[in-house]
Image: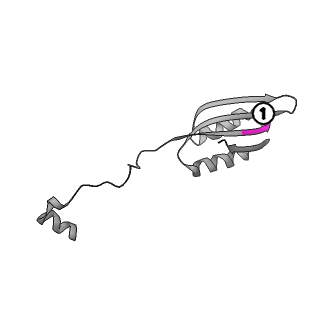
Amino acid sequence: PNILRYINNSSERLIEVSWGEDTSKEQLYPVDIQVIAFDRQGLLRDVAAILSNDKVNIVGMNTASDKKQHQASMIITLEINDLDELSKLLHKINALPNVLDVKRRR
């Protein structure tokens, strides 16, 4: 009620304000994750399928295979919206067969 009274009687006392940024636009953040798994055929496809199904953009990837230990290491740079999305992705990737560890790289 006070604001409405000022609009009519003392509009010079009012100033225009805004509260933070426009949150209608999605903000994407680059995040590096590391996947360690027993090397197997289709591992990269399975990881990429999870990211694709969740509509997560991959902006970079580096994979290496240790033939002696039969392990694969992947460093993947993703664009994510928030930590909740990252947590869900890490959980899904960790549930894949032969995945030993998946974590965010600092």
* Secondary element type, mark 1: strand
Residue positioned 38% across, 52% down in the render: 20
On the question of residue 39 being in view, the answer is: no
Residue positioned 69% across, 45% down in the render: 103
Tell me if 26 is positioned left or right of 1 in this view. Answer: right
Report the residue that reaches farthest toward the left: 9
Measuring from the top left, give residue 54's x and y in whole percent: 58, 43
Is 76 located above or below residue 24 in the figure? above
Is 96 located above or below residue 1 in the figure? above
Q: Is residue 36 magenta?
A: yes
Is 103 located above or below residue 57 in the figure? below
- Quadrant in which the C terminus is drawn: top right
Measuring from the top left, give residue 64's x and y in whole percent: 75, 29
Which of these two is toward me, 29 or 100? 29
- Quadrant in which the N terminus is drawn: bottom left
Measuring from the top left, give residue 80's x and y in whole percent: 55, 43
Tell me if 81 is positioned left or right of 68 in this view. Answer: left
On the question of residue 94 being in view, the answer is: yes
In magenta, the rendered stretch is 35-41
Disc 1 residue crowd, few under 14, some 14–19, many 20+, Cα 10 Å: many
The image's colour scheme reads one colour
Disc 1 marks which residue? Answer: 72
Q: Is residue 70 magenta?
A: no
Q: Amino acid at mark 1?
A: Ala
Image quadrant assignment for residue 33: top right
Is 6 located above or below residue 67 in the figure? below
Residue positioned 40% across, 48% down in the render: 24
Residue positioned 71% across, 29% down in the render: 63
